[in-house]
Image (tube, rainbow, N blue to C red):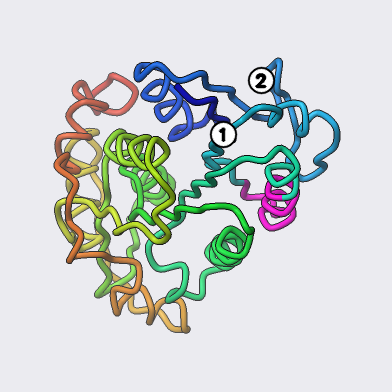
């Protein structure tokens, strides 16, 4: 079996990828800023990163940050992977990073390019938004008495465990280049997702659809972040909500 390094291995996706790879018998090293013995800040690189990669065959890059620095982190990781002689670099990206001009998407697309030009065998998998991210957004919006949504926009949420399964599968295979996208089973309007969330958590809110302006909104409205031709996910948003909020928000109704 191979030695695999998972960056962001304590995160929502990375933790599940790590579990699956270990279950298949691989030696898996988890790299994150606070996870010993490979506690490394990828933005800084350094000798700790070289030590984490020593003897590693495959790198699964799940680490990301809302604070910026993804490109620098990827560049440091790629340089260290080359020095270590790693043969396969797997990166998880987002459907639409090349079509939606969202600030968070731009560095993800840039990292894709770094991976492709790394000189290492590579695989890039794009997925639609995870169910839990949709819930995070809706929870924030539902703090107000009126839940305001972007009109004429949809989403295609996918179960993170299914993405983890696919990413682990790709990590155990030969470099595949751009792998087929992974999308959730249904393209849903934001309003239908919001009403499902409100029902599952027992909240009562008026829902208002508001037309917005700008390139990013137009790209979302046009479905640039969707992959209906790759609706391979099985778990629905309602199934996710039932598993998480069976007794309402934080286990309570009301």
Instruction: Name the residue nearer the viewer: 48 or 27.
Output: 27
Tell me if 46 is positioned left or right of 218 in this view: right
Query: Residue drawn 45% across and 32% down?
Result: 12
**Residue at 17 percent of width and 56 percent of height:** 231
In the image, taking residue 193 as reference, residue 174 lies left or right, namely: right
Asked if residue 32 lies left or right of residue 4, the reply is right
Residue 225 screen position, x and y as percent: 35, 67
The residue lying at 68 percent from left, 43 percent from top is 81
Spot the residue most to the right: 47
Q: Secondary structure at mark 2?
A: loop
* Residue 115 percent coordinates (x, y): 58, 58
> Which residues are drawn in magenta?
65-78
What's the residue at 48%, 32% (across, down)?
14
Q: Which residue was labeled with disc 2?
A: 35
Residue 120 location, x and y as percent? 59, 53
- Give whichever of discs 2 and 1 has the lower sequence position: 2
Give the quarter of the image for residue 187. bottom left
Left or right of residue 51, residue 88 in this image: left
- Say which mark, if any, is on residue 57: 1
| The quadrant where residue 139 appears | top left
- Neighbor class of circle 1 (other Cα within 10 Å; few <14, some 14-19, many 20+) is some
Q: Is residue 67 magenta?
A: yes
In the figure, 60 relative to 211: above or below?
Answer: above
Q: CA distance from mark 2 to mark 1?
A: 20 Å
């Amino acid at each position: 079996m191979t030695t695999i390094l998972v960056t962001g291995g304590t995160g929502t996706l990375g933790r599940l990828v790590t579990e699956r790879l270990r279950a298949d018998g691989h030696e898996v090293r988890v790299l994150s800023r606070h996870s010993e013995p490979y506690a490394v800040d990828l933005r800084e690189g350094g000798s700790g990163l070289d030590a984490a990669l020593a003897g590693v065959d495959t790198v699964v890059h799940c680490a990301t940050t809302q604070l910026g620095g993804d490109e620098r982190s990827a560049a440091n990781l790629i340089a260290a992977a080359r020095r270590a002689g790693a043969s396969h670099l797997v990166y998880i990206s987002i459907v639409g990073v090349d079509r939606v001009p969202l600030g968070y998407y731009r560095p993800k697309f840039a990292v894709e390019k770094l991976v492709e030009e790394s000189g290492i065998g590579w695989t890039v998998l794009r997925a639609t938004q995870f169910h839990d991210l949709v819930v995070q957004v809706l929870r924030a919006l539902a703090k107000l008495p009126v839940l305001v949504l972007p009109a004429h926009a949809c989403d295609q949420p996918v179960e993170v465990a299914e993405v983890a399964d696919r990413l682990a599968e790709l990590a155990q295979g030969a470099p595949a280049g751009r792998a087929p996208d992974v999308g959730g089973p249904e393209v849903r309007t934001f309003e239908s997702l919001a009403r499902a969330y409100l029902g599952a958590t027992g909240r009562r809110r008026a829902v208002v659809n508001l037309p917005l302006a700008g390139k990013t909104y137009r790209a979302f409205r046009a479905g640039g972040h969707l992959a209906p031709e790759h609706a391979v996910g099985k778990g629905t948003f309602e199934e996710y909500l039932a598993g998480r909020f069976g007794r309402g928000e934080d286990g309570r109704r009301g």
